[in-house]
Amino acid sequence: MSRNKGGRPAGAIRDSREDKILYTAVTAVLIVFLLLVAYPLIYVVSSSFSSGTAVSTGQVFLWPVDFSLEGYKTVFAHKLIGAAYRNTLFYTSAGTAINVTITVMCAYPLARNDFPMRKFFSVFFLVVMFFSGGMIPTYMVVSNLKLTNTIWAMLLPGAISVYNMILVRTFLKNSIPQALLEVSQIDGCSDAKYFFHILLPLSKPVIAVITLYYAVGHWNAYFNAMMYLSDQELYPLQLILRQILVANQVNLNEMVDVEALVAKQGLADVLKYALIVVSTAPILCVYPFLQRFFMKGVMLGSVKG
């Protein structure tokens, strides 16, 4: 094998140069993707803090132009925004608590080897995961249960995700030693004490992961509200946002100071960007606190079967 003056194999230099070229190319591609993802977010935030004239005339490119808080003032002056924001916070917190509770309680027996019908229920959940009754039968069930136009229509349908249940079951089965259960039973620990005092504290990573999954789902949910809710006082924030963004309906009669708003050109565009920021900021603030659990929770809960 040929060597250079430093005694290193000649191929080592060639491999090092090839690695540098590869790392440079990968870094360049990642930077391009970062810019593609980051620029729309920066543009939305900048537009929300710009004046209506600057937004409507296309002057905003990267930074706010003619800094203004008029969009945010208008958002919180809308008579439905405050109620919708409170509704979404309630749906997210209560719905996530229901989801996590049912998911963990369902996953626990399926992770126990001594559960008699473990295989039957595992197959049953897999079947319903891929096949459902459909939208119309689901609506008929909700309607016959008298849940339409109530808060329960946003909480009970879809109270458990089979995917998340399988994630938790796999985590409990592969990450919590079976010997721990046996030792606790020898010491006289009941199943309830084992579940609440031993199993749950050791399952914080996967619980944090499914909590964020469920919370994001509830925060962004609007389709169930479209089907089951008719009272605007029960609408979540995303449904009000949809009416403004998708349907392009900005009813100035629902604002507090109509004359001042009509006089401002491009206020509707600023309002849309401000609504996007207001609706996404809370869930983005929660993510950093749970991010450290993601790698451990998802990886340990996804390997094996």
Image: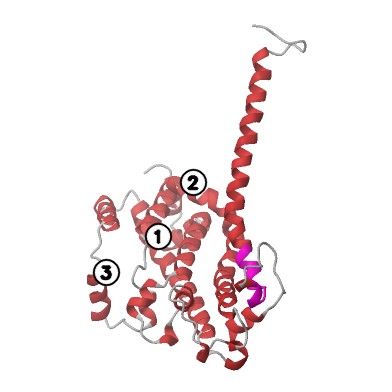
Q: Which badge, 2 or 1, comes first in the chain's sequence?
A: 1
Q: Nearer the viewer, residue 179 or 70?
A: 70
Query: Which image quarter holds the C terminus?
Result: top left
Where does the magenta region start and end?
Answer: 43-54
Q: Which badge, 2 or 3, comes first in the chain's sequence?
A: 3
Q: Give the residue at mark 3.
A: 135
- Which SS class for mark 1? helix
The picture quadrant where one finds residue 227 is bottom left
Question: Distance of mark 2 from mark 1, alpha carbons?
Answer: 27 Å
121 sits to left or right of 304: left
Q: Give the residue at mark 2.
A: 299
**Kind of residue sitting beneath label 1:** Asp
Disc on res. 191: 1
Contact between labelled residues 3 and 2, with CB atoms less than 8 Å apart: no
Image spot of residue 90 (x, y percent): 49, 78
Looking at the image, which residue is at 26% across and 69% down?
135
Which one is in front in this view, the residue at disc 2 or the one at disc 3? 3
Q: Nearer the viewer, residue 282 or 265?
A: 265
Please rate how many residues cluster around mark 2, counting C-alpha atoms within 10 Å: few if below 14, some from 14 to 19, many from 20.
few
Question: Distance of mark 2 from mark 3, alpha carbons?
Answer: 33 Å
Image spot of residue 201 (x, y percent): 52, 58
Image spot of residue 180 (x, y percent): 46, 49
Looking at the image, which residue is at 66% across and 73% down?
54
Looking at the image, which residue is at 58% across and 52% down?
36
